[in-house]
C-alpha cells in the first residue's frame, strides 16, 4: 500500500476518541475501524510496519474480546469476531464433523441411483467396480452377510448401536450443538434486522410517494384555479369592452357584472387576507338573537345582509369594519332568502312578498334602530292594476341607478324601492340576474318576474309538473322515493329535521333552491326532485330523481348541478346525461352548499363547516373559533366564507 493510504488510515484512526466496551487503551485510543485497516497494511508491506501498527497488533486481542453494542433484537454478549464466525460458511463444519462421526462403516448402495431409477431416469453405470456413485452423506441399510443362510433368525440390530462414541466426544458434540444454535440465533437476528431495515425503507418511500402524490394533487388544484382565474379575466375583459361601447352609445349608467354565483375570476382581497390563518373564523357578528335563516354578501369585505328566524328586519353589515350599517324594514314575518349583487338586494319573506332594496340608501334611513316602522307596502294604484307608473323610466335597468327605482314607491320608503306581490305563501328561494328574477315559494309555484316593470311574466306549477312528468328519454329518471305526486303535498308541507346536537326543527320550505342561466332554470323541491325548466315555455323538460328527502339547496355551472338534501347527501349531477356523477354522504341533513371546480362547502347539521376537496376526495371540517350550534346557511366567494348558525351568530372565515 502506498504511504498516502497509510497516512490516510492513520488519520482516521487518530480521529476516534471513544473507547470500546468501556476498556481503556493506550492513547491514542483504538477502534474496530483501525483494527480493520491494520492487517491489510501489514500484509502488503510488512517491512514498512510503523509504531502505530505495532500498537494495533498489541491491542488486537483486547479489541476482539471487547463487547460491541448491538441493535435491538440481536443476540446479547456477542463479540464482533463471534458474530462474524456465526455467519461464515465454516460455521457448519462442526455439523459435518458430527455426521461423519456418526457414519456407519458398512458397504454402501447408491440411494441417489435408486431414486433416479424409481422416477424413470437413466443413470450412468458405476465408474468403479464395487463402488456406487452415491454421495458420502447417503444413509444406507444393507442386509447382513449371513442373512441368506438358513438358521435361527436374529432381531434387527439398530444402526445407532454400531458405532460407539466416547463420553468426551458426546460432550464435545453437546457444546458444538449449543454453539450451532447460537449461530442460528445470530443469523436469524441479522435477517430480522435486514427485514426491519427494508421495512423502514419501504415506509420511508411510501411517505415520500404520498407526499409527491399530494404535490401532484396540489398542482392539479392550482391548474384548476388558474383556469378559473383565466375565465374570470376574460369575462371581465368582455364586460369592460361592452361597457365601453355602451358608454360611447349613450350616457346611461353602466350595468353591473353578471351574477357573482357564476363568477370564476379571483376576488379582490386585501393583502392582509393572506396573513390570516386558514380554517379559523377571524370575525364574529352577533347582533341577531335567533337562528340565521338567510345571508348573502356582495363581495369579500363588502356588504353583508343577514336575516334571522323571528326578526322581520334583515341586518346590513359592513364586512370591512365588522359593524352594522342599518336594517331593512318592511317585511311582515321572517325573511327566508336573500341575494345581494353590488348595491342591489332582493329579499323574500314569509309574507309572500319580494322586496328590492338599494343598499346605498340604508345609511340615509333615519331611525332604523328605533321609532315606528315605515310601511313599505304602499304602492301606487297603477302598480296594483298592473299598469306602469307614468313617471317611471322603464328604459333603465334596476341596476342603472337610483332614478329607475324612485317611481314605484313613495318618498318615505327609504332604501326599499319596489315590492313584488303574487305568492300566496312564504317565498323560500330566489335568484336574479340583470332584469330577470325567479322566485320559489311554499305555494308550490315558481314565478318569473321582470324587475324593470315589477310584473310576473310567468308562473310554473310544481304540482302540475309532478302529475305530468316528462316523457321517457335521455336524462329523464323515474322517482325513487315516496314523495312523487302524493296528496300530502297539496296541503301544508313540513318535514321534521334533526341536527347533530340533538335538536330538531320542522322544515317547511317546499322550494329549496332555484337558479337559472339564459333560458335554463333548475329548481329543487320537497318531493326530492331536481327539475330543469325551459323559461320560454314554462315546462319542466327533465326531472332528476335520486334524493329520498326534500332538496334544500342547489347550484349549477356549465357541466354539473350540485344539490343538497335532508337525506344527508349531496349529489352531483351531470347536465349532459342527467345521471348522478358523484354522491357525498354525511351524518346529518344538508341545509346549504356552494361548489366550484376545486371544492364543495356544505352546512350539514353540525357545528363545523364541511369542506370536500373534489381533487383528492378528502373531507375537512372548520371548527376553530366557530359556531356553538349547527350551521345552516353559508356563502363563499373565492377564499372568503360567511356562515350563519342556529346560535344566531355570523362567522367570517379565510379558506
Image (spheres, grey):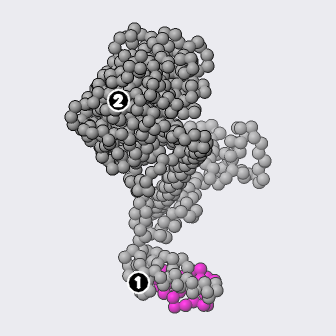
Q: Considering depth in this image, is 465 or 415 the residue closer to the camera?
A: 415
Q: Where does the image place residue 189, in percent across and percent down from the top left? A: 47, 57
Going by the image, does 316 lie left or right of 524? left
Viewer-nearest residue: 639 or 47 = 639
> Which residue does the image show at 40% across and 8% down from the upper left?
487
> Which element is circle 2 on?
loop
Element type where label 1 sits in the image? loop
- Give the x, y percent position of residue 121: 75, 40
Residue, x 34% and y 32% (percent of image)?
411
Left or right position of 383 against 199: left
What range of the chain is rendered magenta? 38-61
From this viewpoint, which residue is outermost toward the left? 371
Which residue, given by chain and number where applicable, does mark 2 sit on?
410
Q: Name the residue beneath numbered marker 1.
A: 25
Whether the magenta-drawn stretch holds residue 537 is answered as: no
Which of the two discs, 2 and 1, labels the residue nearer the N terminus?
1
Majority SS type along the magenta span? helix
Tell me the distance, in whole angstroms, between the alpha carbons under discs 2 and 1: 107 Å
The picture places residue 83, in percent across and down from the top left corner, at 48, 66
Disc 1 packing (10 Å; few <14; some 14–19; many ≥20): some
- The numbered dot on residue 116 is none
Amino acid at each position: 500500500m502506498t504511504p498516502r493510504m497509510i497516512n490516510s488510515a492513520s488519520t482516521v484512526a487518530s480521529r476516534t476518541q471513544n473507547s470500546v466496551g468501556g476498556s481503556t487503551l493506550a492513547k491514542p485510543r483504538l477502534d474496530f475501524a483501525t483494527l480493520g485497516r491494520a492487517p491489510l497494511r501489514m500484509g502488503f508491506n510488512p517491512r514498512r510496519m510503523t509504531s502505530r501498527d505495532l500498537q494495533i497488533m498489541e491491542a488486537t486481542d483486547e479489541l476482539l474480546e471487547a463487547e460491541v453494542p448491538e441493535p435491538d433484537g440481536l443476540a446479547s454478549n456477542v463479540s464482533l469476531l463471534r458474530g462474524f464466525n456465526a455467519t461464515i460458511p465454516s460455521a457448519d463444519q462442526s455439523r459435518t464433523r458430527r455426521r461423519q462421526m456418526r457414519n456407519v462403516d458398512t458397504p454402501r448402495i447408491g440411494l441417489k441411483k435408486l431414486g433416479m431409477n424409481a422416477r424413470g431416469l437413466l443413470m450412468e453405470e458405476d465408474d468403479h467396480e464395487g463402488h456406487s456413485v452415491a454421495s458420502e452423506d447417503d444413509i444406507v441399510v444393507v442386509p447382513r452377510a449371513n442373512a441368506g443362510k438358513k438358521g435361527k433368525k436374529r432381531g434387527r440390530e439398530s444402526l445407532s448401536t454400531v458405532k460407539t462414541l466416547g463420553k468426551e466426544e458426546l460432550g464435545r458434540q453437546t457444546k458444538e450443538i449449543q454453539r450451532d444454535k447460537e449461530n442460528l440465533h445470530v443469523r436469524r437476528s441479522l435477517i430480522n434486522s435486514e427485514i426491519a431495515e427494508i421495512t423502514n425503507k419501504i415506509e420511508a418511500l411510501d411517505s415520500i410517494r404520498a407526499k409527491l402524490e399530494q404535490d401532484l394533487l396540489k398542482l392539479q388544484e392550482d391548474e384548476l384555479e388558474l383556469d378559473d382565474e383565466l375565465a374570470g379575466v376574460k369575462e371581465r375583459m368582455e364586460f369592460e369592452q361592452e361597457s365601453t361601447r355602451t358608454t360611447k352609445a349613450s350616457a346611461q349608467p353602466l350595468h353591473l357584472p353578471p351574477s357573482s354565483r357564476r363568477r370564476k375570476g379571483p376576488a379582490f382581497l386585501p393583502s392582509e387576507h393572506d396573513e390570516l390563518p386558514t380554517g379559523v373564523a377571524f370575525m364574529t357578528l352577533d347582533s341577531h338573537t335567533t337562528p340565521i335563516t338567510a345571508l348573502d354578501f356582495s363581495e369579500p369585505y363588502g356588504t353583508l345582509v343577514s336575516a334571522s328566524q323571528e326578526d322581520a328586519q334583515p341586518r346590513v353589515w359592513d364586512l370591512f369594519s365588522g359593524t352594522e350599517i342599518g336594517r331593512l324594514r318592511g317585511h311582515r314575518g321572517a325573511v327566508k332568502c336573500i341575494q345581494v349583487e353590488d348595491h342591489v338586494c332582493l329579499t323574500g319573506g314569509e309574507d309572500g312578498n319580494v322586496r328590492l332594496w338599494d343598499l346605498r340608501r340604508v345609511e340615509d334611513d333615519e331611525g332604523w334602530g328605533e321609532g315606528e316602522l315605515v310601511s313599505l307596502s304602499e304602492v301606487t294604484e297603477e302598480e296594483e292594476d298592473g299598469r306602469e307608473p307614468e313617471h317611471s323610466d322603464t328604459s333603465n335597468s334596476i341596476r342603472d341607478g337610483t332614478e329607475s327605482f324612485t317611481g314605484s314607491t313613495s318618498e318615505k320608503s327609504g332604501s326599499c324601492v319596489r315590492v313584488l306581490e303574487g305568492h300566496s305563501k312564504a317565498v323560500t328561494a330566489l335568484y336574479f340576474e340583470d332584469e330577470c328574477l325567479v322566485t320559489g315559494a311554499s305555494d308550490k309555484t315558481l314565478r318569473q318576474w321582470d324587475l324593470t316593470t315589477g310584473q310576473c311574466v310567468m308562473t310554473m306549477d310544481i304540482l302540475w309538473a309532478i302529475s305530468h312528468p316528462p316523457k321517457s328519454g335521455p336524462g329523464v329518471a323515474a322517482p325513487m322515493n315516496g314523495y312523487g305526486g302524493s296528496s300530502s303535498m297539496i296541503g301544508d308541507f313540513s318535514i321534521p329535521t334533526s341536527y347533530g346536537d340533538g335538536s330538531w326543527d320542522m322544515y317547511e320550505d317546499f322550494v329549496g333552491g332555484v337558479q337559472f342561466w339564459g333560458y335554463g332554470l333548475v329548481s329543487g323541491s320537497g318531493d326530492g326532485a331536481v327539475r330543469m325548466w325551459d323559461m320560454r315555455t314554462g315546462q319542466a323538460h327533465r326531472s332528476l330523481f335520486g334524493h329520498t328527502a326534500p332538496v334544500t339547496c342547489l347550484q349549477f355551472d356549465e357541466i354539473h348541478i350540485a344539490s343538497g338534501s335532508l337525506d344527508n347527501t349531496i349529489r352531483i349531477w351531470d347536465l349532459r346525461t342527467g345521471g348522478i356523477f358523484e354522491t357525498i354522504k354525511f351524518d346529518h341533513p344538508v341545509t346549504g352548499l356552494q361548489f366550484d371546480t376545486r371544492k364543495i362547502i356544505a352546512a350539514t347539521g353540525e357545528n363545523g363547516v364541511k369542506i370536500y376537496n373534489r381533487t383528492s376526495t378528502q373531507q375537512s371540517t372548520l371548527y376553530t373559533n366557530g359556531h356553538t350550534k349547527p350551521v345552516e346557511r353559508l356563502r363563499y366567494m373565492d377564499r372568503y366564507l360567511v356562515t350563519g348558525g342556529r346560535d344566531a351568530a355570523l362567522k367570517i372565515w379565510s379558506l
